Image (cartoon, rainbow, N blue to C red):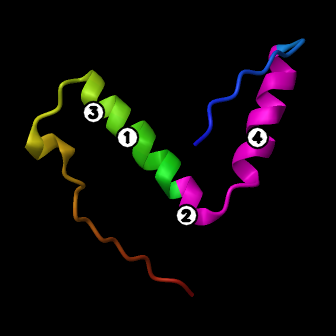
């Protein structure tokens, strides 16, 4: 990912740009971004190896 610096006139303008950026990413890029955010979070809390694992939970819902 390239690092880019942008200057906005308002928070609303910056938020709209974020929405457009993430809505235009392909699904694989969105997963990469999510994993990057997850890794930064886990590093910030000094997560143990056990905490770094994803839970294996599968729920089903009956539909009419």
The first of marks 2 and 3 along the sequence is: 2
* Label at residue 42: 3
For disc 4, the neighbor class at 10 Å (few under 14, some 14 to 19, many from 20) is few
Query: Which residue has dot 4 on it?
Result: 19
From the image, state whether disc 1 or disc 2 is nearer to you.
2
In percent of the image, x 43 and y 76: which residue is there? 61
> Marks 1 and 3, Cα distance to the nearest angstrom?
6 Å
Relative height, residue 13 to residue 35 (above, below):
above
From the image, state whether disc 2 or disc 3 is nearer to you.
2
Query: Which residue has dot 1 on it?
Result: 38
In percent of the image, x 33 and y 71: which residue is there? 59
Q: Quadrant of residue 5?
A: top right
Q: Secondary structure at mark 4?
A: helix
> Marks 3 and 4, Cα distance to the nearest angstrom?
25 Å
Query: Which residue has dot 2 on it?
Result: 28
The first of marks 4 and 2 along the sequence is: 4
Q: Secondary structure at mark 1?
A: helix
Relative height, residue 19 to residue 43 (above, below):
below
* Outermost residue to the top: 9
> Marks 4 and 1, Cα distance to the nearest angstrom?
19 Å
Number of marks in the image? 4
Relative height, residue 2 to residue 53 (above, below):
above
> Marks 2 and 3, Cα distance to the nearest angstrom?
21 Å
**Image: magenta residue range:** 11-30
Q: Secondary structure at mark 2?
A: helix
């Amino acid at each position: 990912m390239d690092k880019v610096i942008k200057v906005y006139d308002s928070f609303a303008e910056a938020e709209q740009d974020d929405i457009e950026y993430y809505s235009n990413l392909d699904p694989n890029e969105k997963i990469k971004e999510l994993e990057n955010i997850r890794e930064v979070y886990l590093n910030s809390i000094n997560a143990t190896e056990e905490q770094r694992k994803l839970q294996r939970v599968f729920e089903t819902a009956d539909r009419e």
